[in-house]
């Protein structure tokens, strides 16, 4: 045990601060890579909307719920939620706080329309956000299903090119050759 501790201390001294810095960098998460992963996740919008809906169902104010949901959202949605939370906390008009997003993302636009409509008519935002999350999840499932169907069609082509000649060479040609030899030997032709 003492030998192991001594060797560990020597390795730390030899590695110096670079070794400790590399170890610290390896152990701390990189927020930029987290946002890249969230941006490519097809279910990221649905999960962020679920967090927003849960916060609203629990009775939080819209500004607090948007601020709580922003860290778990994809970057485009996080910017919109953070902006709306800040403006609503400052007392801005909800129509101004939920203004149109410059990115033009379909899910973000639907959320903004829903929030503006809720602020204007007084309808509950939580049920609409839950429905939007379900629709986003269904859209992601449809996209995945379409990609799988496209892949199956693309896979069938090379398989046909490989297996069809083998089927003819090993299945059809021997049968035809056997029948032809029997017909020619019998003298029918």
Image: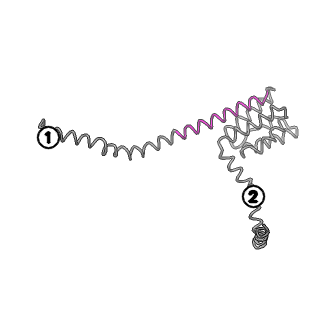
x and y percent of residue 171 in the render?
31, 42
Q: Quadrant of residue 62?
A: top right
Q: Are marks 1 and 2 in contact (CB under 8 Å)?
A: no
* Residue 185 badge: 1
Q: Would you say residue 147 sits in the magenta stretch?
A: yes
Distance between the alpha carbons at the discs numbered 1 and 2: 81 Å
Q: Magenta stretch?
A: 124-148
Give the colour scheme shown: one colour
Residue visible at 44% across and 42% down in the picture = 156
x and y percent of residue 8 in the render?
77, 68
Residue lying farthest to the right in this orientation? 90
Camera-near label (1 vs 2) is: 1
- Mark 2 neighbour class, 10 Å CA radius: few under 14, some 14 to 19, many 20 or more: few
Q: Quadrant of residue 99?
A: top right
Comparing 157 with 83, the one in front is 157
Image quadrant occupied by the C terminus: top left
x and y percent of residue 136 in the render?
66, 35
Instruction: Residue under label 2, please give it.
Output: 27
Comparing 14 with 135, the one in front is 14
x and y percent of residue 71 in the render?
77, 45
């Amino acid at each position: 045990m003492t030998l192991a501790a001594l060797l560990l201390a020597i390795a730390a001294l030899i590695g110096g601060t670079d070794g400790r810095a590399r170890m610290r960098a390896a152990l701390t998460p990189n927020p930029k890579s987290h946002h890249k992963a969230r941006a490519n996740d097809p279910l990221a919008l649905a999960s962020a909307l679920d967090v927003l809906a849960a916060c609203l169902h629990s009775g939080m104010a819209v500004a607090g719920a948007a601020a709580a949901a922003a860290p778990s959202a994809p970057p485009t949605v996080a910017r919109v939620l953070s902006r709306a939370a800040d403006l609503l906390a400052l007392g801005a008009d909800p129509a101004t706080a939920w203004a149109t997003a410059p990115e033009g993302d379909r899910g973000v636009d639907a959320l903004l329309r829903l929030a503006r409509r809720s602020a204007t008519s007084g309808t509950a935002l939580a049920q609409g956000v839950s429905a939007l999350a379900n629709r986003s999840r269904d859209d992601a499932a449809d996209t995945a299903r379409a990609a799988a169907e496209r892949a199956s069609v693309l896979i069938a082509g090379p398989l046909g090119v490989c297996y069809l000649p083998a089927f003819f060479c090993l299945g059809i040609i021997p049968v035809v050759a056997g029948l032809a030899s029997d017909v020619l030997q019998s003298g029918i032709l």
